[in-house]
């Protein structure tokens, strides 16, 4: 799940950032009167449960910047503007562009199912849920779709469209994981899961020869997880075997 990069002090600690948005918060955020100011736009008001109207647009702009960096990187390094396909001249690409997103949707749905199954077993998942909930509040459906789409497109163009070609599978996946580092130690498993997901998305890109599957998978994962986080309460993690009372 990676819809965030906003940070805010709370009770002496910091909220866990989501992937790229945490980087954006470090680059352009500052606090003022309890709110986070992001490039001059107040994006979080701790006194209100409602998200700031401009927040989704600000975050989407950050991911647009990532996409632009990836596009320019690929154009300069590969000497062509087709960042979507690994081999633009390969026959049959139109068919591939149609079916590969379906593969990505299935992959993304499978990843979300795995996280739901283990949500009560892995204590870091409810903790991450609470942190994202505190950051995001209750965005509208439009904002959720915008955040999910912008982060999926921006990160995939940069990491799988440009960086995968330039630096290979392992380095691009490692840097993708690094973008998801939280200052809270209990959330470091999230960083490891992001690295594994990066390997999976890179594998989809290499297998299909285009970004369709990776972008679709990333979008599905983000949208379903963001909806879950902002619409449902965190699960209670089980810290040991459950025994009937009286035994």
Image (tube, grey):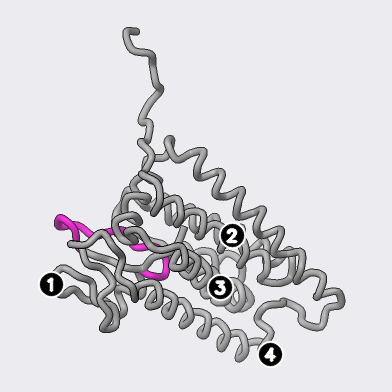
Q: Secondary structure at mark 4?
A: loop
Label 3 vs 1, first from the N-terminus: 1
| Residue found at x 35% / y 75% | 24
Q: Where is residue 101 drawn, in percent x and y?
A: 69, 64
How packed mark 4 is, by other alpha carbons closer than 10 Å (few <14, some 14-19, many 20 or more), is few
User: Dividing the picture into quarters, in which one does residue 93 lie?
Assistant: bottom right
How packed mark 1 is, by other alpha carbons closer than 10 Å (few <14, some 14-19, many 20 or more), is few
Q: Secondary structure at mark 2?
A: helix
How packed mark 2 is, by other alpha carbons closer than 10 Å (few <14, some 14-19, many 20 or more), is many
Residue 4 horizontal side relative to residue 161, left or right:
left
Report the span colored magenta: 9-21
Closer to viewer: mark 1 or mark 2: 1
Q: Which residue is mark 4?
A: 80
- Cα–Cα span, label 4 and label 3: 19 Å
Q: Is residue 68 above or below residue 147?
A: below
- Cα–Cα span, label 2 and label 3: 17 Å
Q: Which mark is residue 33?
A: 1
Label 1 vs 4, first from the N-terminus: 1
User: Dividing the picture into quarters, in which one does residue 135 lie?
Assistant: bottom left
Asked if the magenta segment contains residue 14, the reply would be yes
Q: Which residue is mark 3?
A: 153
Q: Which mark is residue 21?
A: none
Asked if the magenta segment contains residue 20, the reply would be yes
Label 2 vs 4, first from the N-terminus: 4
Note whether residue 178 is visible. Answer: no
User: Dividing the picture into quarters, in which one does residue 124 lie?
Assistant: top left
Q: Secondary structure at mark 3?
A: helix
């Amino acid at each position: 799940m990676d819809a965030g990069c906003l940070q805010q002090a709370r009770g002496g600690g910091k909220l866990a950032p989501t992937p790229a948005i945490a980087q954006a918060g470090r680059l352009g955020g500052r606090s003022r009167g309890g709110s986070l100011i992001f490039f001059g736009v107040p994006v979080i008001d701790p006194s209100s449960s409602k998200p700031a109207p401009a927040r989704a647009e600000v975050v989407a702009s950050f991911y647009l910047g990532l996409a632009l960096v990836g596009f320019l990187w690929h154009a300069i390094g590969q000497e062509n503007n087709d960042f979507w396909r690994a081999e633009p001249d390969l026959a049959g690409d139109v068919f591939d562009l149609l079916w590969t997103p379906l593969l990505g949707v299935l992959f993304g749905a499978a990843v979300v199912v795995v996280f739901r199954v283990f949500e009560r077993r892995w204590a870091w998942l409810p903790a991450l849920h609470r942190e994202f909930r505190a950051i995001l509040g209750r965005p509208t459906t439009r904002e959720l779709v915008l955040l999910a789409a912008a982060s999926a497109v921006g990160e995939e163009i940069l990491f799988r469209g440009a960086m995968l070609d330039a630096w290979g599978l392992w380095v691009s996946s490692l840097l993708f994981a690094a973008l998801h580092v939280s200052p809270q130690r209990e959330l470091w498993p999230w960083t490891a899961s992001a690295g594994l997901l990066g390997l999976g998305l890179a594998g989809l890109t290499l297998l299909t020869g285009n970004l369709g599957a990776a972008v679709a998978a990333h979008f599905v994962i983000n949208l379903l997880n963001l909806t879950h986080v902002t619409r449902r309460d965190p699960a209670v993690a089980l810290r040991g075997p459950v025994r009937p009372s009286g035994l």
